[in-house]
Amino acid sequence: MQAKRFYIFGSYRLDPDTRVVLRSGDVIRIPPKAVDILLALLESAGQPVDKETLLHTVWPDTFVEETNLAHHVSVLRRTLGEGESGRAYIETIPKRGYRFVGEVKEATEDAIEKTGEAHHDPSAAHAGSHGTRRAIIAAVTLPAVSGLVGFWWLTHRSPQAPLYKSLAVLPFRNLSGEPADDYICDGLTESLISEVAKIRVPRVISRSSVMKYRDNRKPLSQIAQELHAEALIEGSIARFGARARVSVHLLDGAGDKHLWGETYERDLADIPRLWGEVAISIAHEIQAQIQPDARPGGGPVQRDAFEAYLRGRYYWNKRTADHIRKAIAFFRKAIDADPAYAEAYAGLADCYNQLGTVLIGGAPPTEIRPLAIAAAKRALEINPQLAEAHAALAYAKLYDWEWAEAEAGFQHALGLNPSYASAHLWYSHYLSMRKRHEEALREVQLSQQLDPLSLIIQTQVGWILQHAGRCDEAIRQLRKVLDADPDYLWALWRIGSSYTSKSMFAEAIEALEKAAKLSGRSPAIVGTLAETYGLAGRKAEARKLLDELKAKARQRYVPAIAFAHAYIGLGDGQQMFASLENAYQQREQGIAWLAVWEKNDAYSSDPRFRDLIRRVGLPAE
């Protein structure tokens, strides 16, 4: 029987059969591909090994970029340190490859046991063959169960601070040459963000902030600074029919240093599962945990369903009534192709929730909200651990005034995905409605930290401040938003309302007139504008806007709350309460905010107002 042989250099010993590296008798954790590279270099010690040879040897059946090779060589250098000469063991030969420069010996196991040396390994004689065999057996056995053990270790090991406290996934580059495939890149970026958010780090930056860098890339260090992200994930996607070549790289944000990277070629529909693998690899690299109740990676998805889902999310993120209707069509197409696709049901719930909002107001909430609830519940039947579905259901329950279920749902969603900015934002709405103002501000500020460049979240910080009675701070916050985008509709609407609360009617009318024009005369904004004109003493303009709302209502759904605002301006309490009752019957969103209305001073003592507060279940004081 041929004696077992080892490569020995410095205090290290490599077993070429088991691919185990020991230092002073202890197993050294080195990625398998890095060990393969080390073995190839040791076999040609002192001689150059070109990059193509290494790539073919280590990745024989896979296309891999040179950056993967460079990354693994970097890992080896960090792990092995320097030899006796003070030089790194592995030398780079520019434009060619690498060379192992340390002294290398080959020795049999018997020879090592007799001499007790692993070349400068004084512990080997004492450890003996049994210790060596135990170390090798352990190292050989572990890879066989590495998938299960690796995930268990990432979820159950003792909590510790990860190397990086904040991550951002930058928009993936479309290398297909087809602009029509942009939706794939955007959708895959968003789905990877969802998977990476399962890593237990304080912050994973949300989609709306990172998407600002899709077409206008800046230096990575500058992006990291603007996003307050310590580590960045970037990559590219090239689609070839049903398959895609995906490259993913993890980088240190401040130093622009490459930490990890891989290139994969997979079927497009298999990428949700791939993202789970990537999330686990990244968690390993930064020494972080995975959320215990949120195992990364989804199950198999039909390709047509996955593509339809990506298109649905692409249109959903545009947040207009027309785009949301397109998103609904694609989510339904995804569900038709794969009836067990939980994420598509969650997307459908998000769409229905938006159609029921005051600003979009596509249909009466009594028609739309049950559809949102049904879609969210179906998503949770399929996948009870889907944070997006818990948040969507909680959002619908919030505006159905099922307060306890809403709060529990938001808390559950945040337990599954603490980096889900939308869940923090919607939870802040709940807290504000309940007059828990300090908690509401804390939640909306957490949302802002997770999505620092999102204008809607920055606007809602001002909105929560306004409802807390801190109108001066709200106005300062909303001015910052408008400094960044003078035409941002939501900020114009909210600052107009804040100005009205301060009786700054000229400023309010200017902002609201602009908002009304930009929105295509949204009934919600027209109602606020009518209220402001009326409170400013310009009753004729207020009545004209009221007539505009009545004309619209003969053609389409107009939220009753818009009429209530107009009647406040006109001082018509009878019609105002009639409109509020209508809004109550329709379960409109605005009713949930009655407890923090700034304009209710004239009506708060009215028994009809107090009764409405009671029926909705809002705090009276």
Image (cartoon, grey):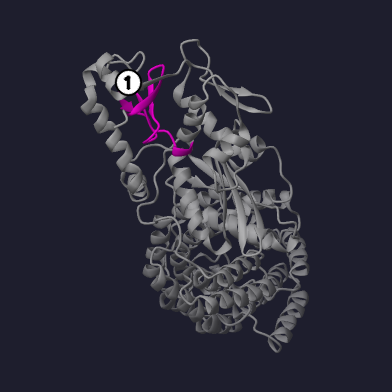
Frontmost residue, 203 versus 152? 152
The reply to whether the magenta stretch includes residue 120 is: no
- Say above or below: 121 vs 16: above
| Quadrant position of residue 532 | bottom right
| Spot occupied by residue 264 in the image (x, y as percentages of width and height) | 56, 50
Image point (74%, 60%), residue name: 178
- Say above or below: 221 vs 455: above
| Spot occupied by residue 619 in the image (x, y as percentages of width and height) | 41, 67
User: Crowdedness of circle 1 by 10 Å Cα count: few (<14), some, many (20+)?
Assistant: some
| Spot occupied by residue 204 in the image (x, y as percentages of width and height) | 52, 48
Residue 462 visible, this angle = no
Tell me the quadrant of the picture where the N terminus can be found: top left
| Quadrant position of residue 312 | bottom right
Q: Amino acid at mark 1?
A: Ser
Image point (75%, 60%), residue name: 179
Q: Which residue is denoted by mark 1 in the rendering?
A: 24
Frontmost residue, 28 versus 333? 28
The reply to whether the magenta stretch includes residue 28 is: yes
Frontmost residue, 314 versus 68? 68
Q: Which residues are magenta?
A: 4-33
Image point (77%, 79%), residue name: 544
- Say above or below: 583 vs 206: below
| Quadrant position of residue 23 | top left
- Left or right of 340: which side holds 61? right
Helix, strand or loop for disc 1 = loop
Residue 196 visible, this angle = yes
Outermost residue on the front side: it is: 1
| Spot occupied by residue 383 in the image (x, y as percentages of width and height) | 41, 67
